[in-house]
Amino acid sequence: MNTTVECVLDAKATLGEGAVWDAQSSALWWVDIAAPSLHRFHPETRRNETWSMPSAIGCVAPRRSGGAIVGLEEGWCAFDPSVGSVRLMNDMAPGLATHRFNDGTVDPVGRFWAGTMPKSGPRDAVAGEAGDGTLFCLDTDGSCRAVLDGLYIQNGLACSPDGKRMYLSDSYKPIRTIWVFDYDLETGTPSNRRTFFDTSAVAGRPDGAAMDAEGCYWMAGIDGWQILRLTPDGTIDRTIPVPVEKPTCLAFGGPRLEQLYITSMGDGLITPGTEERQPHAGGVFVCEPGVVGYAPPACGA
């Protein structure tokens, strides 16, 4: 099955990331970590709203009470798009001096999960040593807790539509693994961590992810010019080539969640000499893969 992947926003982002669908506004939130900036793209008009952020922004989630919550270096912040204001909610994570938030997702009841990584990039992996990134959870009451440490480049967060599974990956080249956890939706507790998919045998490393309504996991294959669909047992079900070397994050959207949006890295981060092959690197892309997607709910904090 051939799938056409179209550039719907030639954004020229340096580090496009954080794609998430907002059903209330029928729009796609996304971020440029390097700018740093927050964006809201309206597919019907192709209008893209942009707000500068005070520090590197790793992730965003629409908020039930309106606006959004963003993961900045200062911590979790409430964002009001009507005036463009950013207000610190919880400064437990990730640490302004050394770390920043990276990838995030919202579980089916509204908890916002996100992990951290060093701003300077991960240190070289040493056999037996864990990374110094941490996975955090912003609970619906606004409190924050550290749940898992030892990560290098945290990525790939997603929850299955039924809330019984949580997925997490590490993009660092020596690791490039996706894990799956059993997930207690009532308490927000992941357990029984195990390998879901080792990307060593495929072209791309695991970056951002999305779930579809059938419980399959979609992986942005950074460095691989492709995205993958993985069945719940960790089998590759489908590979879709994309016109950029470094797809970074995925989100199902559209009226029936039939569209899959893809963010990407741009100039300065792509492989030198590949510019002519990917003139829209740093853009936002969309395709219709022929399945109905799943979009996480708004954050309840």
Image (cartoon, rainbow, N blue to C red):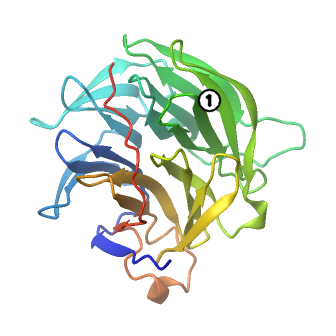
Q: Which of 149 and 288 is in front in this view?
A: 288
Counting from the top left corner in percent of width and height, residue 160 is at 52, 37
In this rendering, position of residue 125 left or right of residue 225: right
Examine the rendering and report whether any part of residue 110 can be seen. yes
Name the residue: 39% across, 82% down. 279
How many other residues sit within 10 Å of disc 1, few (<14), some (14-19) or many (≥20)? many
Q: Is residue 71 above or below residue 217?
A: above
Name the residue: 10% across, 35% down. 83
In the figure, residue 115 lies in which quadrant?
Answer: top right
Counting from the top left corner in percent of width and height, residue 275 is at 47, 84
Q: Which residue lies furthest to the bottom in this view?
A: 276
In this figure, which residue is indicated by the disc labeled 1? 134
In this rendering, position of residue 290 left or right of residue 135: left
Q: In which quarter of the image is the C terminus?
A: top left
Q: Which of 53 and 16 is in front in this view?
A: 16
Q: What residue type is labelled 1?
A: Thr
Counting from the top left corner in percent of width and height, residue 241 is at 53, 75
Name the residue: 34% across, 32% down. 297
In the figure, residue 230 lies in which quadrant?
Answer: bottom right
In the figure, residue 69 lies in which quadrant?
Answer: top left
